[in-house]
Image (cartoon, helix red, strand yellow):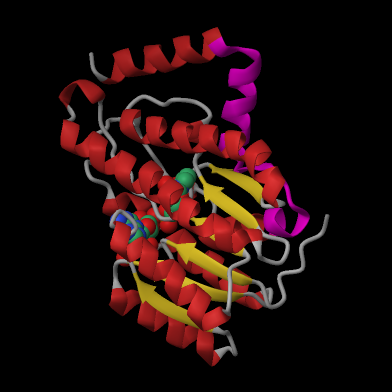
Amino acid sequence: MIRDLTGKRAILTGASGGIGRAVATALVKAGARVILASRSAEKLNELASALKATGGDVLAVPTDVTKPDDRQRLIANCVSAFGGLDLLVNNAGVGSWGHFADSTEAICRTVMEVNFFAPIELTRLAVPHLTRGNQPAVVNVTSMCGRKGMPAWPEYSASKFALVGISEAWRAEFARFAVDVLTIVPGMTNSGFEKNWLRNDGKADLRFADGMTPEYLAAEIVDAVRTNRMETVCGSEAKRLLRFNRYFPRLTNWLLARKVKKLYS
Ligand SMILES: NC(=O)c1ccc[n+]([C@@H]2O[C@H](COP(=O)([O-])OP(=O)(O)OC[C@H]3O[C@@H](n4cnc5c(N)ncnc54)[C@H](OP(=O)(O)O)[C@@H]3O)[C@@H](O)[C@H]2O)c1
């Protein structure tokens, strides 16, 4: 199936961030009408103005995805502005980089709220509208940590595994509504993600600057939506790590443990 994005009515969360901004731009370029959602009204309005200047049909709806009332308002805004919903892109997310033993319950709960409970509850509200949509789909932006739990990313890995898992379950469930579920599994992206982490005291030498550009990832996401690809792993190191782990899981774990012991010795 090829999905034509022209005129598609979309909600994109995390639109103010590095990846979200690039996805918003790519969706508009592909002809979609987009509701831009995240907490920062200023950044959203600035993005909306830039996209409108290129002829884009967009609306900024400041939203904290963890708040039930905000989620209701977001869906209602989309339905009243565009008359329905065809595409929900759950992209908003937060990271926390550091080991579990000296992390906190508050960090764990925040990561799970933003990365798991918020997108699934937003999807619950979106389904009745998607069901009446045109080639409808839910797109969940997860992470390579959602396919391989990584040291110093314990809460984040758990939240993204949960999102990957529910996406798989939804795929068959939502088939009865003819709503597709697409999972994006990105590796490191040079988006500024690390500036917003809840915690930043992991020890490995992470080089986000060497990661994919948000524009590259956005093009992959739009391509996945167009071609209705069920799961898309993006980025060379994510592809390498997940392939290696599939064939050599014990060796992968041993290498990761060796690295941790060395870093913390
Ligand atoms: N960068 C990477 O290397 C990488 C790799 C794999 C996966 N990802 C995933 O890609 C997605 C986008 O990340 P990014 O790299 O673009 O990071 P980012 O620049 O930190 O952007 C995160 C976005 O999420 C929004 N957000 C955070 N908490 C929110 C809340 N409670 N309500 C509404 N919006 C909220 C932020 O906007 P406000 O602050 O304005 O609310 C921002 O727009 C995330 O799900 C992330 O886990 C990133």
* 164 is higher (above) or lower (below) than 63: above
* 148 is higher (above) or lower (below) than 20: above
- Is residue 117 on the magenta stretch? no
Question: Does 138 sit left or right of 4 as displayed?
Answer: left
| Residue 225 percent coordinates (x, y) | 69, 57
Q: Which residues are magenta?
A: 223-249
- Ligand 1 position by quadrant: bottom left
| Residue 249 percent coordinates (x, y) | 56, 13
Which quarter of the image is occupied by the C terminus? top left
Quadrant position of residue 190: bottom left
**Residue drawn at point x = 40 percent, y = 31 percent:** 157
- Whether residue 156 is visible here, answered yes or no, is yes
- Is residue 236 on the magenta stretch? yes
In this view, the residue in front, 52 or 98, is: 52
Give the total of numbered labels: 0
- Whether residue 192 is visible here, answered yes or no, is no
**Residue drawn at point x = 81 percent, y = 59 percent:** 2
Magenta: predominant secondary structure element?
helix
Quadrant position of residue 109: top left
**Residue drawn at point x = 47 percent, y = 68 percent:** 21
Residue farthest toward the right in the current orientation of the protein: 1
* 139 is higher (above) or lower (below) than 11: above
In this view, the residue in front, 73 or 141, is: 73
**Residue drawn at point x = 59 percent, y = 34 percent:** 169
Quadrant position of residue 28: bottom right
| Residue 118 percent coordinates (x, y) | 37, 50
Which quarter of the image is occupied by the N terminus? bottom right
In this view, the residue in front, 242 or 130, is: 130
| Residue 206 percent coordinates (x, y) | 38, 39
In this view, the residue in front, 118 or 263, is: 118
Question: Does 8 sit left or right of 165 as displayed?
Answer: right
